[in-house]
Image (tube, rainbow, N blue to C red):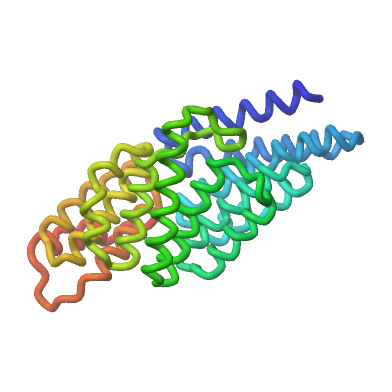
Amino acid sequence: MGGQAAALRLTTSAYRRLDGTTPSRDLADAVDGHIRLIQSITSAVTGDADRARLAAVGSEAASFAGWLAWDKGDHGSARSWYGGAVKAARTSGNALLTAYQTGTLAQFEAHAGNGVEAVNLARRARRVLGEQRPAVADAWLCSVEALGHAAARDRRRADQALTASRAAAEALTADQEPPPWPWVFSFTPDKVAACRVTCGARLGVPEWVLDEDVEALTTGHAKQRALLVLDIAAGHLAGGRIEAAFALASHALDTGLQYRSGRIVERARTVRRSLTTSSPPKVVRDFDERLHGVYL
């Protein structure tokens, strides 16, 4: 059964690698079938250890399905999948996985604008791990808390969380130790820079956005960078630089349309709604024309 679980986990990882270059809508059906296979195999096993191992596999797959739904702009399905990932992680008995999935749900809620819920979930993830939590979990959860505070319009607490996250990330970089599973990525100062850009965009603090934009854009794949570019566009807009803002937003929208990402397109619409003017300049009118009739 251990080999079966490993093979299923490998398949989830393969789908994740495709995410950076494949529209989520094209991946979603295959991932749904993969999850049904995991559920079918799980229902046939009887041993507690095997069920726990497969629950962990199912948690990872459900979390990825949540990510795909989020990218498609389907928040209801994303929240359902992320909640299922947390429940499966609890069933697995793995505290690290449970904390990771709870933090991932917190991250989603922060981006959805539910700041208080995001902060509460991040704190719950900390409680799951207790005082012995890995350094990467601490650094990452600080960044998630920053996003939650920004969504709740609390600039002071967001800044405190970002400062703590950067200090922890710099210590991790110096340590060079690989992160424990399920943190399969390294958490670097560049990721904190990207988080600060997003927080600044949500709070309307252009200096947070424009001070970090070059460093932040070294992270993530094309879809993730497009979302960051839209945050940078929001920073320019908050600073009164309309032409620069919509030039950037147009480039990000290109990526959103290329990958048919509902999340990117909706974020582009949010940037556009933040500008209220009775006589928009040509760059804004062109942007409106491109957005007109886009239904993802």
Q: Is residue 27 left or right of residue 93?
A: left
Q: At 40% from the left edge and 65% from the top edge, which residue is drawn?
A: 150
Q: Position of residue 204 (x, y in %)?
A: 28, 67
Q: Position of residue 231 (x, y in %)?
A: 29, 56
Q: At 27% from the left edge and 42% from the top edge, which residue is drawn?
A: 215
Can I make out residue 85 in this image? no
Q: Where is residue 87 in the image (x, y as percent from the top left)?
A: 72, 52
Extreme residue toward the top, this view: 3
Q: Is residue 144 above or below residue 31?
A: below
Q: In which quarter of the image is the C terminus?
A: bottom left
Q: Position of residue 167 (x, y in %)?
A: 41, 46
Q: In which quarter of the image is the N terminus?
A: top right
Q: At 35% from the left edge and 41% from the top edge, which residue is drawn?
A: 190
Extreme residue toward the bottom, this view: 278
Q: Is residue 296 above or below residue 254?
A: below
Q: In this view, does 227 lie above or below 116?
A: above
Q: Is residue 45 left or right of residue 240?
A: right
Count of marks, rendered view: 0
Q: Would you identify the image quadrant in which residue 249 lies?
A: bottom left
Can I make out residue 59 in this image? yes
Q: At 40% from the left edge and 33% from the top edge, which residue is drawn?
A: 21
Extreme residue toward the right, this view: 46
Nearer to us in this view, 89 or 81: 89
Q: In this view, does 159 lie to the left or right of 181?
A: left
Q: Is residue 98 left or right of residue 2?
A: left
Nearer to us in this view, 193 or 232: 193
